[in-house]
Amino acid sequence: MRIFTTLVISAMVLILTTPAFAGDDPFLWLEEVEGAKALEWVAEQSAATTKVLEARPEFEPIRKQTLEILDSADRIPYVGIRGNDLYNFWQDEEHVRGIWRRTSLEQYRQAEPEWETVLDIDALVESEGESWVWKGPTCLAPDYRHCMVALSRGGGDAVVYREFDTETNTFVSDGFTLPEAKSEVNWRDADHLWVGTDFGEGSLTDSGYPRIVKLWTRGTALEAAVTVFEGKAEDVSVGAYSQHTPEGRYDIIYRTPAFFRGERFLRLGERLVKLDLPDDVQFQGFFKDRLLIALRSDWTVGGTTYPQDALMALNLDAFLRGCRSFDLLFEPSAKVSLAGVAWTRDRLLMTTLDNVRGRLYELQPTAEGWDRKQVSLPGLGQASFAATSKDQDLYFFAYQDFLTPSSLWLVNGDTKPEKLKSTPAFFDTEGMTVTQHEATSADGTLIPYFLVTPKDYTPTGENPTLLYGYGGFEISETPFYSAVWGTAWLERGGVAALANIRGGGEFGPAWHQAALKSNRNKSFEDFIAVAEDLAKRKITSPEHLGIMGGSNGGLLVGAVMTQRPDLFDAVVCQVPLLDMKRYNKLLAGASWMAEYGNPDIPEEWAFIQKWSPYHNLAKDADYPEALFITSTRDDRVHPGHARKMVALLQSLGHPVLYYENTEGGHAAAADHGQKARMTALEMTYLWMKTGK
């Protein structure tokens, strides 16, 4: 147990430490993903960690229960609508890598639908001797017979594409195929594919994504595909796709120079017409011959100023003729933001967040304007579009909150929402409560967070508490039902908190933009403020508080661990970014410079260096014994981040735990067995540290 000294300090006080190193990086060799020396180090570290955690009494019950939940036949089989068929990808104890299957709506209404297996991934793994992980299909409307199936070796982002026929349920022997790469593939028609892939030297951006998009004709070699558009090496990516609607087909080319910035071109014959839109607009697509956009900043056009986060529509023909008089479909307010947009054949669908609580609306265009109807939800949790039909007026939405099992609802035309499926109540919620609070960040901004308390909870300051956050890329953290957290944490007496810090999208683009680049530390200050508020309310105390975050959330918990190690006794840092000096040189890192800044520019490294976790470790600090988790096959966030952080901590004399799964990609797990083991390691660790 770490010894804590009670100090009255504000969030503005910095912990004074001696930097770990000022010269060359001593652990660059750990960036060699498959290097023999690096893998030997990984094996030793993982073995030492699993030996400690798997010996704990909590581990096996949590692993077993988690696997039972993940493999449960009573889970909701979420579907995608393709024509008159409903498709689902399913994994369980029998189908470890999964099966792609389909059924009808009539069958899906049944408690136990009859499914037809379309593709068995386990059988494919066995027959081909490859560790395939399903990455999903791209199918051609409106008959959805032609599909490009993406398969990953071990779960990474790089995939192999193969053409699949859903009538014969076989791969097309002489069809379109692409070798392993981070490709972008979409159908134009049955004989043409839009393709962005690794065409050879110079064809990828600095981020490792396609720089060139081509149109590939069936029966010809990939080398013969016609170049349609080329971006720049410093772009994130370029690509093309066709949106098939009842009114016709729209061919769209896009260029993404940076995250949340882009250009869109409409291909008319052989001509590309650039859409005259702000470069930070959220391009939603086309509905009923109308161009749909959402704004990330105020836009004054056509004599009107449209506000940031507005959803707007304008007839495409009128837009191309120069008209800029948009229909304003959604206007945000201080606490209400746009969450999602989708559509059926005749209805535009929209979800919003009202103080981080979900709302769902249907909109229909008329001669007089737009009819708007709110769809009732079961509670104040999260609503999201599970599947929509572009050929019918039919859609599914999912609902969940912290204590209500996830449910799936069908809306068919003018009918009221019909509950079709529900997750079992995997844990007993009797006596549990959900409340929403606010913490005051260092600059005075109020930061909301949700608190879930277990049965018989009293604010003693000694409750084991797990605080989760993300705070990046305009991604909102909303109420969710987790059977795993319920059984492994809440039901065992733990408290859970979800922080809605800046950098996310809970209150629209401005909430995200408030923590970009030189302001990145605001998201860390927000998280620290929530942790302090939990102690202030005597919900918990540092000795009993654990924090968790993955990817950008891994950067979050890594940063606050180095800035305020006195606030926590447990840190679960999953697939993280940590070395912010070299992140833009590792895998897809260059694509995130709009979020964090460019460390190769001295002025930007000056502010990045202040919070880069790897560069703020110190020998004389008192860090919690953190658990770092990553995957050898993560080809998005380089495993070197976690590896080097652990090695540096150890070299400075700090205890630390580390686990690296050999598969799983950025999810760090390729199947339910791996996921259950990883979850059990994390939860066991949290109980070991916070349950004292």
Image (spheres, rainbow, N blue to C red):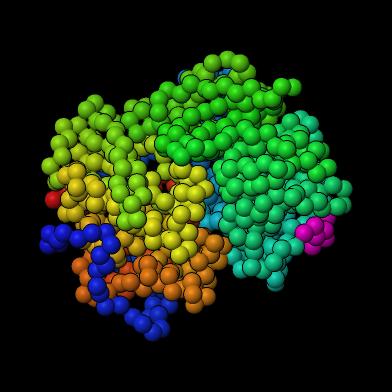
For the point 17% across and 50% down, which residue is it? 541
Q: Position of residue 132 (x, y in %)?
A: 54, 51
For the point 48% across and 71% down, which residue is it? 604
Q: Position of residue 388 (x, y in %)?
A: 61, 30
Can residue 606 be seen from the camera position used here? yes
Which region of the structure is painted magenta? 220-229
Quadrant in the picture for the N terminus: bottom left
Residue 8 picture quarter: bottom left
Residue 167 picture quarter: top right
Q: Nearer the viewer, residue 72 or 597?
A: 597
Q: Nearer the viewer, residue 233 or 259?
A: 259
For the point 53% across and 64% down, which residue is it? 593
Can residue 72 be seen from the camera position used here? no
Residue 570 picture quarter: bottom left
Q: Position of residue 639 (x, y in %)?
A: 43, 65
Q: Is residue 23 above or below residue 676?
A: below
For the point 38% across and 84% down, which residue is it? 23
Residue sticking out furthest to the front: 303
Q: Is residue 395 above or below residue 539?
A: above
Residue sticking out furthest to the top: 415
- Residue 226 on the magenta span: yes
- Residue 228 on the magenta span: yes
From the viewer's perspective, tell me whether residue 306 is left or right of residue 382.
right
Q: Is residue 288 above or below residue 489?
A: above
Tally of marks: 0
Q: Nearer the viewer, residue 386 or 602?
A: 602
Residue sticking out furthest to the bottom: 23
Q: Position of residue 335 (x, y in %)?
A: 44, 38
